[in-house]
Image (cartoon, rainbow, N blue to C red):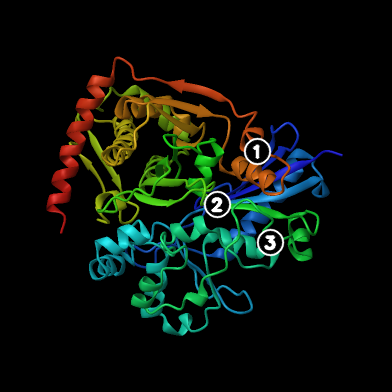
Amino acid sequence: MSRYLLGIDLGSSSVKASLIEADSGLLKASAAYPETEMEISSPQHGWAEQDPNRWWENAKHAVRSVLQVSSAKGEEVLALGIAYQMHGLVVVDKNHKVLRPSIIWCDSRAVSIGEDAYNQLGELYCMDRLMNSPGNFTASKLKWVLENEPHIYKEIHKVMLPGDYLAMRLTGDIHTTVSGLSEGIMWDYQKGTVPERLFNYYGLDAQLVSDTVPTFSEQGRLTTDAASALGLKPGTPVSYRAGDQPNNAFSLNALNPGEIAATAGTSGVIYGIVDKPTADKLSRVNTFVHVNHTSDNPRYGVLLCVNGTGIMNSWLRKLLSATTSVSYETLNALAGEAPVGADNLFVLPFGNGAERVLQNINLGASIHGLDLNRHSASHICRAAQEGIVYALGYGFEVMNELGIQSTVIRAGHANMFLSDLFCQTFVNTTGARLELYNTDGAQGAARGAGIGIGYYKSHDEAFRTLSCKKSFEPNAQQAVVQDTFNQWKSILKKQINTHP
């Protein structure tokens, strides 16, 4: 009988499932649902919500689809792993019923709450104990619910991150991880507990926070109902969970100090591994507990996140598809028709909520230097891709200030990194070699599940088939790209200085 490991990646655009052969470690099949991007509801300016029940429906479709495509049998799946969109808030009652839509990662409503907490609790406490400003993270979102929806807060039995919710639907058990609590700013790095002082300041009940389980461990088993809904065997263990960016780094076998991973989906991230907690007092980049952290072998991830990356490209595709459908491949081809610098056309892609790297300013996306006589769709496509890269490069400079540097950055050959133009601009901006690997978040979650049940005895064994598909080095265009990047930063600075 064949043996497989299943990974589920709960994103904000879709839910992806990947099945790998346990013995060879090779991908058997992948599937994602829905085929079009999941809706992000925005009832008010700066809000971003999704229905957790829809995540579950999409997960069922994705898993059943991957089983059908692969012809694998449910009983052949040894274990499941979960990756998920970070920082979201899911609240359920005692019957595990969702009480309100999830306030997801790019929602900006709690920015002022987190800033007030930082000012009141002080830099010393926040940087030493939380490693971050409370900012717009999960704990601050829960405080918003307490203040604005007290009738809902009273009904809360447990607070969860998106991956915890998916695990609950699979197993009936409610747990989280230390890495997960750290991403929600619900972890005291010195005490190793929920941060009592922050929760007291917010007036939150620490009992609402779930108990933790190790990232790699048996965290529950599929219930009969969940197994039937997915086409799997009852009792199959869920043995790994991690937020999408720590998981992306894990997927790329980035586990040791000095290793850096990147991704460019709806948001764009550069994530560097360190062995000592490193905090940015302006909280432009954020430090979380990495997936392989232990007290004897500490590992942390310093995360730069730009909300407006792939979603900028998605918006542009939809705009150009007003009369005829335009693919991302067409966008990439159009971008390649324009010169480096897009003939002095610049895009700031910050149109997806408050940006941490800009100290939580909700700057909005904007186009600068548009000449209606000279610029075409190709110039806009190129300027958008360059603007996305420059936003990441701007944040990478912040990481460099903290001493996080590397000559190599790893990424999966997916999303924006499918564009050679994007990749070449990325290396010419950062100055680092870019290596693209044959993996994604769902495959990483599947490998994590294999480690979690002990099928793989080491990380090296789990990643023995990971291979670099393509690489990029800085080239002769680097000087002009750097010049364009500097012009872009000047425009950004002016926008920040004039922002109300």
Can residue 373 be seen in this snapshot? yes
Q: CA distance from mark 3 to mark 1?
A: 26 Å
Give the mark nearer the N terminus: 2 vs 3. 3
Residue 391: image location, x then y, percent: 30, 40
| Circles 3 and 1: CB atoms closer than 8 Å | no
Going 76% across and 34% down the picture, which residue do you hit?
23
Give the mark nearer the N terminus: 3 vs 1. 3
Q: Which residue is mark 2?
A: 242
Q: Amino acid at mark 1?
A: Ser
Q: Amino acid at mark 3?
A: Leu
- Furthest-top residue in this view: 476
| Circles 2 and 3: CB atoms closer than 8 Å | no
Q: In which quadrant is the C terminus drawn?
A: bottom left
Residue 448: image location, x then y, percent: 63, 45
Nearer the camera: disc 2 or disc 1: 1
Q: Is residue 445 above or below residue 126?
A: above
